[in-house]
Structures are given as structure tokens and as C-alpha cells.
Image (cartoon, grey):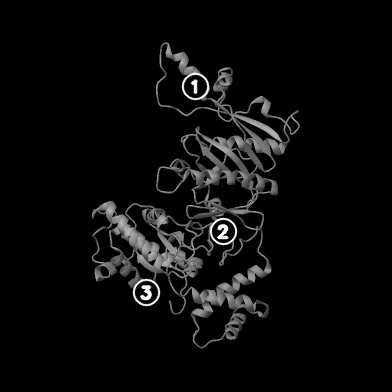
């Protein structure tokens, strides 16, 4: 075990330094505010130790600490496990990571623990930070932060996750060397790199959960408002953000990313079958043709027997048949659909979708490298709480509209969770009543039917919006386009969307500019 001590400057007060007899007192006060936070560096984890903030005499006796820049190590902290000599290269890397992560924090916040997690894409490194604040002495507040390093030798890191710990926080083992944390309706999964790291992390989390429960921390009040500072600092790239959002026990998973180098012969053949299958289905009478006849047509096109690919062909046929049901265009910038629409890359590109709002607990993000995702991980159950998420989902949809592109909102079938979220968006954005928004969505997607629990939450949301605005709606488009369900409104909702003049249209990476092929029946 190595000991690393970090000197941290006090937060700026915004007041000028007094002149005269009180100047010496101010210097002493600043010295007392100066803190040295010490950490025990273990393999895969960093534990925060008691610092010296409360020891005023020690601080006054060490004025040189005030001049030490943030993140600089104290000489006595650069030791090996036995306290002699220099650190090993691994411990030096951990110490460097520690100093970089401390620099992400506000001066008034403390890192209680940093645990290294498994990374899906080495050489990336991921850390889970347990951070508390000194702002509110009357209650103990904690936030979990996720930090990403491009590699072990990187001289910079970014934030990829912010999860406040409310009084309802629950921690569960997932049975595969990791654990899940559920707080305020959000669930995240973490897999430490070792059993020792997991044990240390669970101990600190248990203390934080007990403190949150004892303080009665609930969303909507003045508690944990400082978490917004870190929320604004999220800057990891999209693939890192997707990894922090990853969930276990998903029912529908994206296919594995192709490995580096040339595709195998089997992968090349599957790509060829997939491309030709579109054409075969598009030119066939799907009500009379059999699976065997489709395989025989593919064999003629590709010039080789495909017996060994029968299962693959059948699975692809079912997938393409499901994708014939197009996503419903509810507004010029918003589509409502199912998991099949979310998995249909050609349709997404044809519709110029850049953002995907995934409202399903059980459905993966199929193209995390191509689109911007936002996840609300809930089951389609009456007890599920959608309402707390509608502020952030509204903001996400508006981000796509501001770019001049479009968003797909989906769950599993595009019936309940995603439909309720689109209805809530319409109520807030256009000042519609629940009845108006529901009628508009169902006219354009007749299968839309939020479950009774979501309908009750929409009624509550209507009351919140009415009380907040008293009839003065601030959403763009308010009062334009006619009554929902009228010919004017229907024409407006399905009109081709034209971005504002001079606005650069965002083309998702890898998107094809050409129109995609159409299947029969679309």
C-alpha cells in the first residue's frame, strides 16, 4: 500500500483581501482552510483518509502548503508499500490518475473512494468515484462519478457519469463480479477489477446509503443540487457514455462489433446474404413464398449452396419482416417506433435520425458509434415512474430539433412507454391537454396505448404544467397548426421538415447519403 497526499486550495470566496490589522487574521484563516487530503493507494482502488483541515495549528505551521499547486504530491507520499524508495510503475500510474481525478472536483468536495472498473474496450480505463461535499454540514450528501481515461498513460481524463445517491438508493450484487446501484429511478452496473476492490467499494457505498437514508434526501428539494455542476461537465465521448449506461440481462442485444482486420469468410458471406435478402424479399410475393424458396433464390444469386446458413437466413428474414413496420412520424422532427425501427440502420439513415431515445429496460442501444443515445431504463409496468424523466427527455428531443435533425423515440413495441413519453413531450412543447396530445399521437400511431399507470402520471403531469404556466405556454409552436387531429394539424405533423436557413445539418458518422431500398408492403 502506498500513501499519496494532495494539497487542495480553498474555494474562492469572491471577496477582496482586507487591508490593515485584519490582514494577518485573514492569512491565518486561509491557512486553516488549506487542506491536505491523503489517500491509501491499493491495487485497483484509492481510499480517502482523514485530512488535516480541522487541525488549524498544523495548517498554520505549514504555510508552504498554500503555495503548492493543486494536485502536487507531497514528498512523503511517494513511497512503496513498505514505505521506502520510489513507487512501482503501476503505483505511479495510479497516483497520476488520482491527481488528475482530484482536479475534476470542486475544492469543497472530497473523494472518499476511487475504484477501477472493468473496461469493455481496452486500453481504456474507467474509475468509479464516491464524492461527498462539505457545503452542507447538516446532512451527508454523496454523488457517484464515472471517470474515463483513454489509456493508462494518459495525462487527461473526462467525466462520463453522474449519479446522485438519494434516500431510496439500493445496491445489489449481480452475481458476475459486479453490483448495481439504483437511485432516483436510475440504475447503473459497475464491475470492479478485483474482489478486493469490490469489497472496499461496497463498504463505502453502504455508509453513503445509510447517510442518505438518515438525511431523508429526496429529489425535488434543495438536496444534492451541487450534482448539477458535474452534470454540466460530462464530456466523455459517446462510446464511453454508452458503456456507463450499459445494462445487464437485456433481451435484445446489438451484434458484437467487428474485430480489427479483414472480416472472416463467414462474416463476408453473411454480409452478402443480408444484402441480397433485401432484394429477394422486395421482389417476392411474401404471402406465398416459403423460406426454402427464398434460400434457393439466394443460392442462385450468390452462386453457391447455403445449407449451413439456413438458421442465419431465417433469423434475418424475421428481422426484415419486422422492420417493414415503419416508425410513425408524430412531428416533423420526431418518430415513434419499436425496437425493430431502432435496429433498422437503413431506415434510421433514410429518416435522417441523429438522436435515439431508448425508453426500454430490456433493449440495447444497437448503434452506439453512429447515433446519440439517451436511455430511460424502465419496464412496462404500472408502477414504473416515467414522470421524473420527462424533463430530460424533452430536453433531448429539443436538442435534435435544434440541430435540424430528427429523433426516434422507442421502447419494445412503441405502444406504452415511448408513446407516453411522446405525449408528455407534446403537452409541454405545444401546450396541449392530455386528451389533445393522446388523440394526435393515436391518429398517427393507432397502436399507441400507454398503460393505466402511465396515463395517471400524464394526468399528474398535466396538472403540473397547468399550475406552472397558468395558460401561458412557453413551448415553441404553441397555438400553431390548428387543433390536434384536424387536417391542418395532420398536414403540419407530416410535412417534410426543412432545417432553418443557414443551419448545418448533422450527418451521423457513417450515414449513407443515398436513399435506402424499400421492402414490399412499406
User: Which residue occupies the foreground of this view, 234 or 122?
Assistant: 234
**Pick the front one: 235 or 112:** 112
Give how far across and how far down residue 372 sits, in percent: 48, 56
Q: Residue furthest bottom?
A: 288
* Residue 374 in view of the camera: yes
Residue beneath label 1, please?
Answer: 30
At x 58%, y 75%, the residue is: 315
Instruction: Give x and y (percent) for residue 40.
Output: 66, 35
Q: Is residue 168 above or below residue 518?
A: above
Mark 3 falls on what kind of element?
loop
Q: Which image quarter: residue 449?
A: bottom left
Q: Is residue 427 left or right of residue 11?
A: left
Q: Quadrant of residue 226?
A: top left
- Looking at the image, residue 62 lies above or below residue 121: above
Q: Nearer the viewer, mark 1 or mark 3?
A: 1
- Image depth: mark 1 or mark 2 in front: 1
Callouts 1 and 2 close, C-beta under 8 Å: no
Q: Position of residue 207 (x, y in %)?
A: 58, 43
Q: Which mark is residue 120?
A: none
Task: State the residue position of label 3.
Answer: 446
Q: Which quarter of the figure is the N terminus placed in?
A: top right
Q: Residue at x 62, y 75 (%)?
A: 312
Which residue is at the front of the view, 160 or 449?
A: 449
Q: Earlier in the sequence, mark 1 or mark 3?
A: 1
Q: CA distance from mark 3 to mark 2?
A: 31 Å
Name the residue tied to disc 2.
Answer: 247
Residue 498 showing in the rendered view: no
Mark-to-mark CA distance, 1 and 2 = 46 Å
CA separation in Å, label 1 and label 3: 66 Å
Q: Is residue 96 above or below residue 423?
A: above
Amino acid at each position: 500500500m502506498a500513501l499519496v497526499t494532495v494539497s487542495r486550495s480553498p474555494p474562492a470566496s469572491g471577496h477582496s483581501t482586507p487591508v490593515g490589522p485584519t490582514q494577518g487574521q485573514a492569512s491565518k484563516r486561509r491557512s486553516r482552510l488549506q487542506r491536505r487530503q491523503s489517500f491509501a493507494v491499493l491495487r485497483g482502488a484509492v481510499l480517502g483518509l482523514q485530512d488535516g483541515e480541522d487541525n488549524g495549528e498544523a495548517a498554520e505551521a505549514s504555510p508552504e502548503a498554500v503555495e503548492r499547486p493543486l494536485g502536487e504530491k507531497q514528498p512523503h507520499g511517494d513511497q512503496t508499500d513498505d514505505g521506502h524508495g520510489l513507487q512501482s510503475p503501476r503505483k505511479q500510474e495510479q497516483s497520476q490518475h488520482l491527481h488528475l481525478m482530484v482536479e475534476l472536483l470542486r475544492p469543497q468536495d472530497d473523494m472518499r473512494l476511487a475504484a477501477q472498473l472493468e473496461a469493455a474496450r481496452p486500453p481504456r480505463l474507467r474509475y468509479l468515484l464516491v464524492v461527498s461535499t462539505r457545503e452542507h454540514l447538516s446532512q451527508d450528501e454523496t454523488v457517484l462519478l464515472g471517470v474515463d481515461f483513454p489509456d493508462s498513460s494518459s495525462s487527461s481524463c473526462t467525466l462520463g457519469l453522474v449519479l446522485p445517491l438519494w434516500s431510496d438508493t439500493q445496491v445489489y450484487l449481480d452475481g458476475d463480479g459486479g453490483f448495481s446501484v439504483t437511485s432516483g429511478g436510475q440504475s447503473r452496473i459497475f464491475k470492479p477489477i478485483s474482489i478486493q476492490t469490490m469489497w472496499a467499494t461496497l463498504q463505502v457505498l453502504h455508509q453513503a446509503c445509510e447517510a442518505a437514508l438518515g438525511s431523508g434526501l429526496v429529489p425535488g428539494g434543495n438536496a444534492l443540487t451541487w450534482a448539477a455542476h458535474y452534470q454540466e461537465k460530462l464530456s466523455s465521448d459517446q462510446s464511453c457514455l454508452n458503456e456507463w449506461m450499459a445494462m445487464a440481462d437485456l433481451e435484445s442485444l446489438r451484434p458484437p462489433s467487428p474485430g480489427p482486420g479483414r472480416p472472416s469468410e463467414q462474416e463476408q458471406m453473411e454480409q452478402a446474404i443480408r444484402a441480397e435478402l433485401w432484394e429477394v424479399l422486395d421482389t417476392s410475393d411474401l404471402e406465398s413464398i416459403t423460406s426454402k424458396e427464398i434460400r434457393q433464390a439466394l443460392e442462385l444469386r450468390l452462386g453457391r449452396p447455403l445449407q449451413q446458413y439456413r438458421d442465419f437466413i431465417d433469423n434475418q428474414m424475421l428481422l426484415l419482416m419486422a422492420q417493414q413496420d415503419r416508425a410513425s412520424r408524430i412531428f416533423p422532427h420526431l418518430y415513434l417506433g419499436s425496437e425493430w425501427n431502432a435496429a433498422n440502420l437503413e431506415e434510421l439513415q433514410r429518416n435522417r435520425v441523429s438522436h435515439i431515445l431508448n425508453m426500454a429496460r430490456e433493449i440495447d442501444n444497437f448503434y452506439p458509434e453512429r447515433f446519440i443515445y439517451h436511455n430511460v431504463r424502465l419496464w412496462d409496468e404500472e408502477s414504473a415512474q416515467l414522470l421524473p424523466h420527462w424533463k430530460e427527455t424533452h430536453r433531448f428531443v429539443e436538442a435534435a430539433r435544434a440541430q435540424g435533425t430528427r429523433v426516434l423515440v422507442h421502447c419494445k413495441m412503441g405502444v406504452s412507454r415511448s408513446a407516453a413519453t411522446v405525449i408528455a413531450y407534446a403537452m409541454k412543447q405545444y401546450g396541449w391537454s392530455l386528451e389533445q396530445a393522446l388523440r394526435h399521437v393515436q391518429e398517427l400511431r393507432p397502436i399507441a396505448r400507454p398503460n393505466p399507470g402511465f396515463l395517471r402520471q400524464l394526468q399528474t403531469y398535466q396538472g403540473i404544467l397547468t399550475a406552472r404556466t397558468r395558460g401561458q405556454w412557453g413551448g415553441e409552436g404553441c397555438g400553431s397548426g390548428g387543433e390536434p387531429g384536424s387536417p391542418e394539424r395532420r398536414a403540419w405533423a407530416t410535412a417534410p421538415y426543412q432545417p432553418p436557413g443557414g443551419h448545418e445539418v448533422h450527418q451521423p458518422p457513417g450515414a449513407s447519403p443515398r436513399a435506402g431500398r424499400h421492402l414490399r408492403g412499406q
